[in-house]
Amino acid sequence: MRTIEELTEQVRNNGGKVTAQRLLIWQTLYNNRTHPTAEELYQKLKQGSPTLSLTTLYNTLNELASWGDIRRIDNGDGSIHYDPFVEPHVELVCLICHKVVDSQSKPALLSAPEEMDGFKIISHSEQYYGYCPVCRDTFNQIKK
Amino acid sequence: MRTIEELTEQVRNNGGKVTAQRLLIWQTLYNNRTHPTAEELYQKLKQGSPTLSLTTLYNTLNELASWGDIRRIDNGDGSIHYDPFVEPHVELVCLICHKVVDSQSKPALLSAPEEMDGFKIISHSEQYYGYCPVCRDTFNQIKK
DNA sequence: TACTTACTTATAATTATTATAAAATAAAAA
DNA sequence: TTTTTATTTTATAATAATTATAAGTAAGTA
Ligand SMILES: [Mn+2]
Ligand SMILES: [Mn+2]
Ligand SMILES: [Zn+2]
Ligand SMILES: [Zn+2]
């Protein structure tokens, strides 16, 4: 995601207000390399700001997603995860336990084309689906 | 996704039963190049099988997803979309209206490695996020 | 400082998905 | 073929994530 300064500009340029809530949420996401859900973020954020509402968190997350500053991930566990790291990287998703982890492997494509089929491209991602070490073992044992 | 014959084997090998419901759902998904939601599929399936339950549809979709025969897509519109076409292909996702379309462009990586960071890899996908022709124009007009 | 408008909050509503348990049925066994 | 049994389906209810609403709050501006 972009820096706090750039996001501040983004909001102001569109007639928006840089509120304490937006700043708090931005700061928590910035440089975060996990894939938290809204609820997980909320529990963490409430510590510093007990009156923060889930609605505001969702609004802010949706806003960031629409700008391409964070990316939604559906891993199949029932809630959406958010990834503030939108530079190209490889993600591994377990088809059984739904774990999502960043891999250290280099992605196949480092930069996206600016335009594709009429879409203005902002970011891209690469995901690998399969069975994590735990589920793979469990799976093999059951089959045996 | 695999053929009906292969899926039949998959079920039987695991002590399962090849029911009329499973077959119906498999057939509807096979060779389907759209990205339907559970509800969209349900409306279509009900025509041929009025007593089919949403629960069964969800169970079957989850099962196929856990085998890697279909892939879940979260485009941010509130419900999960399913893609029965799991061979490598490029997808374009609009950050504003949440449209998802397959592109004709060639994906950066045609085959996935068998293993990565301990995961047994079954499939992979490549997504490009940005603004579709409609949202892009709307966006530009508003900004002007 | 006071004004305007965007934003936040608490609350309620909605909607997608999953759990439950009784009835049905595919497939194996007799 | 008939019987048996485990799996699956169905209807229903429950859950849990996300969004809508409307009144109050505060950021930006002059
Ligand atoms: Mn990631
Ligand atoms: Mn697709
Ligand atoms: Zn796993
Ligand atoms: Zn769009």
Image: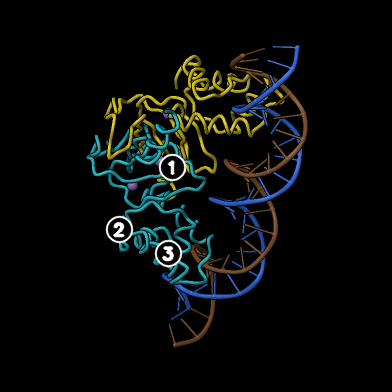
Chain colours: A yellow, B cyan, C blue, D brown
Quadrant of the rendered image containing residue B103: top left
Whether residue A7 sits left or right of residue B122 in the image: it is right
For label 1, being within 8 Å of ligand 4 is answered yes
In the rendered structure, the residue with mark 2 lies on which chain? B
Per the image, the residue denoted by label 2 is B31
- Quadrant of the rendered image holding ligand 4: top left
Q: Residue at x 34, y 46 (%)?
A: B101
- Secondary structure found at label 1: loop
Tell me the SS state at disc 2. loop
**Viewed as shown, does residue D30 lie left or right of A137?**
right
Looking at the figure, which quarter contains the N terminus of chain A?
top left
Vertical order, A110 against A78 (above or below): above
As drawn, the label of residue B98 is 1
Q: Residues within 10 Å of mark 1 (few under 14, many from 20)?
A: many
Question: Residues under labels 3 and 2: Cα distance?
Answer: 16 Å
> Which residue carries the number 3 mark?
B22
- Nearest to the observer: residue B53 or residue A21: A21
Q: Nearer the viewer, residue A93 or A107?
A: A107
The reply to whether callout 3 and callout 2 are in contact (CB within 8 Å) is no
* Marked residue nearer the N-terminal end (3 or 2): 3
Sequence-first tag of 2 and 1 = 2
In front of the other: label 3 or label 2? 2
What amino acid type should be assigned to the residue bearing mark 1?
His
